[in-house]
Image (cartoon, coloured by chain):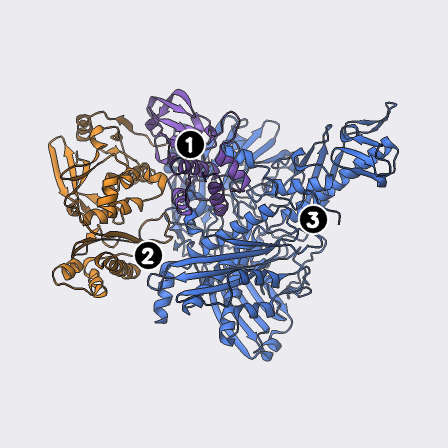
Chain colours: A orange, B blue, C purple
Amino acid sequence: MLSYEYVKCTDLNQVFQLMDKGEQVYPLAGGTDLMVGMRGGKYAAKMLIDIKGLEELKVLKEDEKGITIGAAVTLNEITLFAPVQKNIPILADGCHSVGSYSIRNRATLAGNICNASPAADTAAPLCCLDASVNIVSSSGTRAVPIGEFFTGPGKTALQKGELVQSIFIPKPYPQAKGVYSKASRTGSVDLATVGVAVQSWGNQVRIAVGAVAPTPVRAVSVEKAVNEKGEKDWANAAKLVHNDISPITDLRGSREYRFHMVEVLVRRGLEQTMEV
Amino acid sequence: MAELKYVGTSVPRKDAIEKVTGSAQFIEDRFLGPMLYAKMKKSTVAHGKIKRLDTTKALKHPGVKAVLTGKDYPNKIGLYLVDRDFMAVEKVRFWGEPVAIVAAVTEQAAVEAVELIEVEYEELPGVFDPIEAMKPDAPIIHEDLGSYDLVPIFYPQPGTNIANHFKLRKGDVDKGFAEADMVIERDYYVPQMQHVPIETHKAAAHWSPDGKLTIWSTAQSPNVVRQLLAKSMNIPMHKIRIISSYIGGGFGCKAGASLEGLVVPFAQKFPGHVVRIVFNREEDMQGTFTRQALNAHLKTGVRKNGRITALEYKMIWDGGAYTEYGVNIVRAAGYSSTGAYDIPNVKTDSYCVYTNNSIGGPVRGFGMCEMQWGIERQLEAIAKELKMDPLEIRLINGMKEGSTTASGQVVHDVAFDKCLKIVAEKIGWGKKEGNFRGKGIAGLVKCPAQPSNAASSAIIRINEDGTAHVMVGATEMGQGMLTVISQIAAEGLHIPVDKIDIKVPDTDFTPYEWQSVGSRITYTCGTSVKRAAEDALGQIYRNASNLLEVPPEDLIFDGEKVYSTKDPTKSATIREVADSCKKCTGEGIAGPIIGTGSFVPTNMTNLDSETGQGNPGMFYCFGATAVEVEVDPETGVIKILQLAASIDSGKAINPRLCTTQLHGGTIMGLSTALYEEVLFDKGIMLNRNFTDYKIATIENVPHMDSFIIETPETNGPYGARGIGEQPMIGVAPAIANAVCDALGVDFNTFPLTPERVWRAIKAKQ
Amino acid sequence: MSEKVNINFSVNGDQETREAVVGQTLLKFIRDELHLTGTKEGCEIGECGACIVLLNGKPVNSCMVLAVELDGQELVTIEGLAKNGELDRIQQAFIDHAAFQCGYCTPGMIISARALLDRKPSPTDEDINEALSGNLCRCGAYQEIREAIKASSKK
């Protein structure tokens, strides 16, 4: 059994104090990545601070500016949240693609992005939605665009003492179709070999891809061709995604297959979202 | 045969209520007494000499009671070829091989102490491919192979890495090839897989001051564990007690003896403590048997009419670092090497080869999934060349009543054609359904792989009230042994199933059973139970005859009372007969009724060492699998549209449980066909948890259509034969054949992952 | 030695106060401290589902939860489903359809199934597949499990 301190926090100031003064202090929300990481020796926690009881982090709301998803909100709660289902179903798809039902009862969106796996299923949809990450610390708050949040495999823009408070998806919503499609070994509970989010915004498109670069990335070459050059041949457009990625070979698939699959899924995503 | 009352009915499982309420006890659920916890230090190299092994710091760690190394275990252990140390002595032969073990008062202390053990290795060149390992200049993994004890039906070649070379020569292959119109020659490969029962391997040991060793284990075969430990640890059998619990899945990985012996020396050192070892998932995947990888080469001669005239089959198996069990898989695959087909001229060479990979061993099918992959794929290739219907070629060559196997054994009670036709018909064989859709079929056969004298026995005690206890040494790992054995007992005793109690084995009380492996328990243990029941029923009649003064042949026992068929007023309740039966004068007639029965096959023989000819099969169980798939030609994803499986179970003792076995085996086959492959990098197992090694979930499993064919097995209890392993065999080739039908692409290996299918499609373009 | 914390919770309807060791998983706590051994360990990384329990009515992998997180929560394990000696409908359906073999995954399977029926009384095959895809059954009782759940759903 691992040995560390555990503090159930009751307010954010307490969180900041503990995070500022301690080394190897990890916030605990759903714990589904943290527990695996600690068992596997990835995290040598000296202290866990349980943040899921904090009201500030349980926020799940829609207002005139957009949708705010607190760091303690579970993936299943997000999937079922009517404004998400109605306005940004691509995020519901992404959340739904993570793990199994019982895992999603604990796992959070904030946790999924903080784990910063290049294959994180929620990341690509968020990248298509102009989402931003609200970060808090003892020195205040800052909002980081989702595209700048991921800095490498397992690495984020979070500084010491900082905590993700919420994820914000701004209005206007796309008002159009978006799909998150995932290639995996089994098509059941599995990590993405390739994850592709394609979100139509009228005649414009945003595309983000996962598991094919050190971080989830926007397929800017494809977007440019479609949005700026008016490319309508989706197969041609999809080929350009190769310029935006640098996949590796691992247990789930080869670099070559990833190159191929990302192109296929981008093309299919374009077909599904851009054609009426 | 009289009408059957209990056999052939789908009574609910005996273990049902316990299992749905969480009260079924697996070994880790039992409170056994004051505990010590054992954890292993494992090798970090795949092949190397242990230069230094220092346990001093670990011993000083708080809570640690003792640390042992390989030298603390007196002898080697092994079922067929005794080549395996409990822990490495002087050298390690695979990555993750245990080199030391700690016992501590808490699991945490044991884990910490393991980290404090210092080991230095002098790395030796490793060999990870059995074909490489057979080459003359390959590093030798077992220098002392020539000195190992073995059952003399195995043929190791000292000075090489060949742990067994099984030879089979039937007919005249040269003549057979000369008669052929066409010869097809191909290579096939089957990778390692893991059983991954959801319950990992676990064991606990207790040494009582009077020298009695008690072991609780997840072992499939308590009697074999007792036998091997007795020999290896020099303890007489009556001083070893092996207690079984429910087992959370076996599939072969818990056969033989595995981890039990590791904790015995600790138990001896600390009498009164229970020393427990529990493998975590990673240890379970890496440290227990994997399915041996197979490199297969088939050369088949066939006439234009589809009749196969000759087969040359060369198999090179990756036995891994120790082949104590694996040598017999190689033998079984060798003597069965024509699969479900009658081929007159056969030459087979099956080699079990040491490598520095994880230990190979038995998995559901015992070599048949691996060996028949090549057979069934080759048939597809032949059919294609001859432009013949794949079903037709199977029917032409398929075994029939009186056919001979590769080893020359004549098979009886065969309805293989029925198995094939019923699944083919179910999926609409011969009808092309559209682009990217295809249909495939595969046949299958297996006999239990066991020594010719592997025995079973049973004891039935009739209680004073006419209820009964059945005692057998078979284990319950999900296959339904408790239920089926109770039904066989009920039939023989005329006592209803719900008045029969049966428990998992305890070698101090339950009689001998060789092993719960090889789809043999219904047949072997079932026969011994049937005999015990007949013995007990005979006593019931004898007692009643004395009591009622009616000749025994005029008596009928209906489960409640015994009465005369001539004069039904002459009757006695079972209670009167079974509870110290006495006359009305008070004179005793008979004491408690105990029926006994035992079984050993008498139809099996040794095989000739040069030709492999003889009778290795106690019975042969045939079946077939048919599938329809739709393949996404861009992504390589296979969708199973239809999946039909048949098995000739003989008399289905419990039809519903037969169906669950058929489904279960089919799903395991599906999972290995599409997803499963253990990946190694120079002996290091890369995918050793459920994140990296995926098995089928409920989402991956389509609706299955299942067909239980009931061609009575002449010698089986009530005509039954075992079916536990067989349903798995045909699934991978049937799917590959269907994908081939859909896209015209060929596979010599599986799993058919999306990427592999995509590569095949790409290669064709 | 690790720190211990007092926790209050309800388990299978009974209110309890216990000490929990920081670092201990809820799974270990349920098995080793509450001695409710129906909940099984199969992987320790949330992949197999053998340890699934209901936490505040929702199925969660108890190997992914800390025992100390149980404070103030409501826990139901497999032992809590049968009431007054009467099996829950889903338990009976598992028996009737032979929806298990070795039985090791069964407690987690039944908990997931119970939770599904609580939120969707008439689940489709797709609902069942989704709800139970985190419960691995190596014996392959999946078809029978689907049948058992369908049989205990509201028509």
Chain letter belonging to callout 2? A
Chain letter belonging to callout 3? B
Residue that carries the numbered disc 1 in the rendered image: B107
Residue B281, label in figure: none
Which sits in the foreground, B726 or B703? B703
Whether label 2 touches label 1, CB < 8 Å:
no
Residue that carries the numbered disc 3 in the rendered image: B717
Mark toward the viewer: 2 or 1: 2
Q: Is residue A95 visible?
A: yes
In the image, taking residue B34 as reference, residue B468 lies left or right, namely right
Q: CA distance from mark 3 to mark 2?
A: 50 Å
Chain letter belonging to callout 1? B
Which sits in the foreground, B322 or B540? B540
Q: Is residue C41 visible?
A: no
Which element is circle 1 on?
Answer: helix
Question: What amino acid does circle 3 point to?
Answer: Pro
Question: What amino acid does circle 2 point to?
Answer: Gly
Q: Residue at x 43, y 49 (%)?
A: B695
Q: Residue B715 at what x, y percent from top left?
A: 71, 53
Question: Within 10 Å of the Cα at label 2, are there few (<14), some (14-19), or many (20+) other Cα atoms?
Answer: many
Mark toward the viewer: 3 or 2: 3
Q: Residue B205 at what x, y percent from top left?
A: 54, 33
Q: CA distance from mark 2 to mark 1?
A: 37 Å
Q: Residue A161 at what x, y percent from top left?
A: 17, 33
Which element is circle 2 on?
Answer: loop
Residue that carries the numbered disc 2 in the rendered image: A253
Question: Within 10 Å of the Cα at label 3, are there few (<14), some (14-19), or many (20+) other Cα atoms?
Answer: many
Q: Is residue C102 above or below residue B587?
A: below
Q: Is residue A242 above or below residue A28?
A: below
How many discs mark residues in the rendered view? 3
